Image: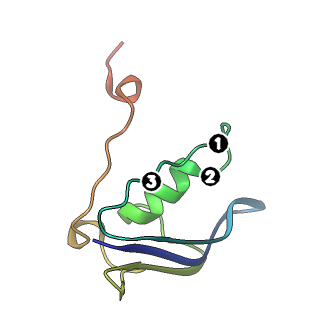
Amino acid sequence: MSIELKNVSMKFKDTTAVHDVNLKIEEGQLVSLLGPSGCGKSTTLFMLAGLYEPTDGSILFNSKDVTRLEPEKRNIGMVLRTGLLSAK
């Protein structure tokens, strides 16, 4: 599957979590999102999974716009860090 983000932004009230991201990942490519805490890595993944809807821009899978497609219809998922799933 190819994945493309076109001018994707995400704002939460007065905070911009992701600003104008443009990225194209071809089928078979391996990509890592790296950066300090709070730079928008998880927000970007949540948008790809359909858990957040970007405030601007488009998300395409295999050239099909899935920006407003429900998470269960995207054929993509994500795994959270183990620490978030552990009971104390």
Q: Which residue is mark 2?
A: 40
Q: Amino acid at mark 3?
A: Val
Q: Do the CB atoms of the residues marked 2 and 1 lie less than 8 Å apart?
A: yes
Residue 83 in picture, x, y percent from top left? 40, 23
Q: CA distance from mark 2 to mark 3?
A: 15 Å
Residue 3 in picture, x, y percent from top left? 39, 72
Left or right relative to 51: residue 34:
right
Could you classify mark 3 by the number of other residues whose Cα lies within 10 Å: few (under 14), some (14-19), or many (20 or more)? few
| Quarter of the figure with residue 9 | bottom right
Q: Which residue is drawn at the image coordinates 32% and 49% (left, top)?
A: 78
Nearest the viewer among 62 and 81 is 62
The N terminus is located in which quarter?
bottom left
> Circle 1 — which element?
loop
Residue 46 in picture, x, y percent from top left? 45, 57
Q: Which residue is mark 1?
A: 35
Q: Amino acid at mark 1?
A: Gly
Could you classify mark 2 by the number of other residues whose Cα lies within 10 Å: few (under 14), some (14-19), or many (20 or more)? some
Left or right relative to 61: residue 17:
right
Q: CA distance from mark 1 to mark 3?
A: 13 Å
| Quarter of the figure with residue 17 | bottom right
- Of tags 2 and 1, which is closer to the observer? 1
Q: CA distance from mark 2 to mark 1?
A: 8 Å
Q: Which residue is drawn at the image coordinates 39% and 32% (left, top)?
A: 81
